[in-house]
Image (tube, grey):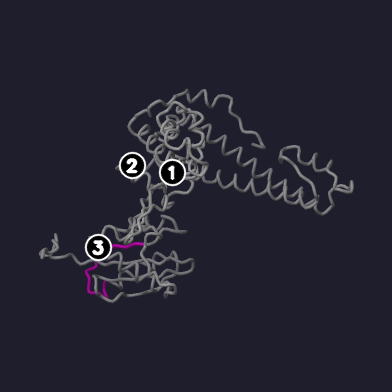
C-alpha cells in the first residue's frame, strides 16, 4: 500500500484563523475555526459593519488561543455584494477568496436542511479543505481590478436599456392589439400615428388608453435617448481613447463580421483584463465547454455547460451566424459547411455552438498573439465607423 505524500507534515504549522462569510442584506453570519476538526465559532454581525467585523476576528483569535498577528484566511460566495468586501479584506491583510456559488457541493437529498448558519459552517469546512490542498473543492472567481470592473458598466447598462426599450415597444403593441390595432414599428412619429388610428367601429383610441400610450411612449423616448448617448460615448472612446483596451477593440473591428457591440463586449468582459492559459479555460468561462455524462453503462454528452458568462455566450452564438455570411472563405466557415452544411436545422443549431467556441478561440489568439485566422478578411476599422450615427429609434 502506498501512502499519500504530505509536503509539510514534519514542518511546524503556523497558527491561522479561518473565517467564512454568509452575506445577507441586514446581517452577516461568520464561522471561525483555527484548524480542521475544531467546532466552528458562529457569530452574527450587522451587514457592512467593518468595525464589528474587526472585533469579532480579534475575539476569535483570543478564543482559540491564537497570537494577535496570526494570519486570517477567509471566503465568501460571489453575489449581490460584488467585490468591494474582497478588496477591503485584502487591505486589512486578510487572504480572501471569492467562491462561485454554483460550484459549492450540496447534499442531493430532495429535502435537506438549509439555513445561513449551516451555509456558513459548510463554507468554513470547504475553506479548510481548500487551504489543506484540495484545489478542486470549489471554483474561485477571478476578481477584476476596480478600473476593469468600472469599464464594464457602459456596455452592461446599454444592454439593460435595450432590453427595457424592447419591453416598452412590446407593451405599446400589446395595448393596441387589445383594440384590434397594430403598428409595425414604434418610432419618432408614433404620436401622429396614434392620433390617426381608428378601432373596428371607426372610433379613435379610447381616452384613458390614449393617455397611457402617451406615457408609455414618453418612457420609450427617455430610454432611446439614453441608448443614443451611451452609443455616442462608446464611439468617441473607440475613435480617440489611447488605452490598451481600446486598441484591442480596434483590432477586433478590423475583422469583417465583428461589429462594435461584439468587439466592445469581448474586450471588456474577457480580453481586456483576463489571462488564459489555454483554450479550455476560455471555453469554460464562456459556458461553451462540453459536459460529458458517464455512469456505469451510460455514457453520453449533455451539451455545453452554460456555466459561464451569459452575455458573452449569447453574443458569440449571434455573431457565429453572421460569420458564415461575412467570412465565407474562412477556414471556420468551410469547417462548418463541411461538417453541418447538409444537416437539418436542428443539427445546424448544434453546429453553430461549436463554431462559436472555435471562433472565440480564434479571436483570442488574434488579439493576444496577432495570429490572423486562416482565410479571414480584414478591413479598415475607421472606415467601418465612418458616418455611423445613432438615431432615436435605432
Q: Quadrant of the N terminus?
A: bottom left
Give residue 137's quadrant in the image: bottom left
Residue at (52% x, 41% y) in the render: 345
Q: Which residue matches tag 3?
A: 71
In front here: 372 or 193?
Answer: 372
- Distance from the alpha carbon under mark 1 to that under mark 2: 16 Å
Magenta segment range?
Answer: 61-75
Above or below, comparing residue 2 to residue 41 in the picture: above
Q: Under tag 2, what secondary structure?
A: helix
Crowding at dot 1, Cα within 10 Å, few <14 / some 14-19 / many 20+, comes out as: many
Q: Under tag 3, what secondary structure?
A: loop
In this view, the mark in front (3 or 1): 1
In this view, the mark in front (3 or 2): 2
For residue 309, the mark is: none
In this view, the mark in front (1 or 2): 2
Left or right? Give the position of 162 relative to 88. right
Q: Which residue matches tag 1?
A: 269
For residue 279, the mark is: 2
Amino acid at each position: 500500500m502506498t501512502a499519500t505524500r504530505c509536503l509539510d507534515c514534519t514542518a511546524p504549522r503556523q497558527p491561522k484563523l479561518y473565517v467564512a462569510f454568509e452575506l445577507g442584506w441586514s446581517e452577516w453570519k461568520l464561522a471561525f475555526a483555527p484548524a480542521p476538526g475544531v467546532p466552528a465559532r458562529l457569530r452574527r454581525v450587522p451587514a457592512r459593519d467593518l468595525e464589528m467585523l474587526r472585533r469579532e476576528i480579534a475575539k476569535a483569535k483570543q478564543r482559540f488561543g491564537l497570537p494577535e498577528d496570526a494570519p486570517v484566511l477567509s471566503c465568501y460566495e460571489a453575489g449581490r455584494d460584488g467585490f468591494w468586501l474582497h478588496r477591503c479584506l485584502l487591505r486589512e491583510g486578510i487572504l480572501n477568496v471569492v467562491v462561485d456559488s454554483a460550484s459549492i457541493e450540496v447534499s442531493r437529498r430532495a429535502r435537506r436542511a438549509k439555513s445561513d448558519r449551516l451555509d456558513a459552517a459548510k463554507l468554513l469546512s470547504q475553506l479548510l479543505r481548500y487551504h489543506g490542498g484540495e484545489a478542486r473543492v470549489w471554483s474561485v472567481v477571478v476578481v477584476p481590478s476596480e478600473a476593469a470592473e468600472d469599464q464594464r458598466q457602459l456596455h452592461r447598462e446599454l444592454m439593460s436599456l435595450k432590453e427595457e426599450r424592447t419591453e416598452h415597444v412590446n407593451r405599446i403593441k400589446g395595448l393596441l392589439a387589445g383594440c384590434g390595432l397594430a403598428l409595425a414599428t414604434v418610432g419618432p412619429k408614433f404620436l401622429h400615428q396614434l392620433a390617426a388610428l381608428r378601432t373596428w367601429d371607426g372610433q379613435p383610441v379610447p381616452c384613458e388608453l390614449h393617455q397611457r400610450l402617451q406615457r408609455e411612449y414618453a418612457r420609450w423616448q427617455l430610454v432611446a435617448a439614453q441608448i443614443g448617448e451611451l452609443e455616442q460615448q462608446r464611439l468617441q472612446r473607440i475613435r480617440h481613447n489611447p488605452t490598451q483596451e481600446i486598441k484591442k477593440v480596434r483590432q477586433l473591428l478590423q475583422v469583417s463580421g465583428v461589429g462594435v457591440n461584439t468587439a466592445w463586449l469581448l474586450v471588456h468582459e474577457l480580453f481586456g483584463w483576463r489571462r488564459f492559459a489555454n483554450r479550455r479555460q476560455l471555453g469554460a468561462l464562456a459556458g461553451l465547454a462540453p459536459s460529458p455524462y458517464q455512469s456505469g453503462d451510460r455514457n453520453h454528452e449533455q451539451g455545453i455547460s452554460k456555466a459561464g458568462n451569459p452575455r458573452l455566450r449569447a453574443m458569440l452564438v449571434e455573431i457565429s451566424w453572421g460569420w458564415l455570411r461575412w467570412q465565407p472563405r474562412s477556414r471556420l466557415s468551410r469547417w462548418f459547411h463541411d461538417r453541418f452544411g447538409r444537416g437539418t436545422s436542428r443539427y445546424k443549431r448544434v453546429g453553430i455552438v461549436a463554431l462559436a467556441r472555435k471562433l472565440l478561440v480564434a479571436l483570442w489568439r488574434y488579439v493576444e498573439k496577432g495570429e490572423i485566422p486562416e482565410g479571414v478578411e480584414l478591413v479598415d476599422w475607421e472606415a467601418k465607423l465612418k458616418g455611423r450615427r445613432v438615431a432615436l429609434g435605432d
